[in-house]
Image (tube, rainbow, N blue to C red):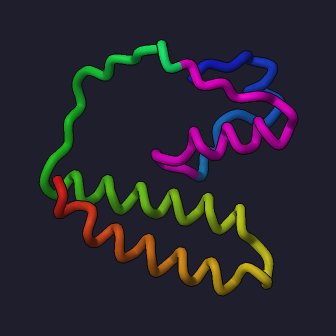
Amino acid sequence: MVFTRQAFDSVGGFDEEYFMFVEDVDLCFRLKRQGWRSLYVPEAEIVHSGAHATGPVMRDMVKVHHESARKFLFRLYGGPLYWPLRQALRVGLWLRSLIAPLRY
């Protein structure tokens, strides 16, 4: 992800309430609401080396990932009218967090 300092500062940077995961989604969403554009560049390549998690650590990472997704979606769908949707999302994310670690 690449953006200008002006864009980053205009939305207050990353939200520190996200420990990890979904902080990029949240940042891009807030940038879009401020009128900034996102572009997808399929030719761009990123190589991630190092850091590999398995076993109990992977289960913890999946749990944190789903908690961050829940936090983002609950903020996106706030207010009393979205209460049923938030409950469905809560159950769905909880179930997925139980199943996802089994796939690794």
Q: In the orientation shown, which residue stands out farthest toward the right?
A: 35
Which residue corresponds to the image point at 67% horizontal and 38% vertical from the top-left? 28
Which residue corresponds to the image point at 67% horizontal and 39% vertical from the top-left? Answer: 27
23 vs 53, left or right, is right
Residue 19 within the magenta-colored segment of the rendering: yes
Q: Position of residue 17 (x, y in %)?
A: 59, 52
Residue 47: x and y in percent read 33, 17
Residue 53: x and y in percent read: 20, 43
Q: Which residues are magenta?
A: 18-41
Q: Is residue 48 left or right of residue 72?
A: left
Check the image and report above or below for 89 versus 29.
Answer: below
- Depth check: give the residue in front, 48 or 9: 48
| 24 with respect to 30 (left or right) | left
Q: Position of residue 75 (x, y in %)?
A: 70, 63
| Relative to 44, 41 lies left or right | right
- Which residue is most to the left? 55
Question: Could you tell me which residue is drawn at 72 percent across and 69 percent down?
Answer: 77
Q: Quadrant of residue 78?
A: bottom right
Q: Does the magenta segment cover residue 16? A: no
Count of labels shown? 0
Residue positioned 23% across, 52% down in the render = 58
Front residue (pair 100, 54):
100
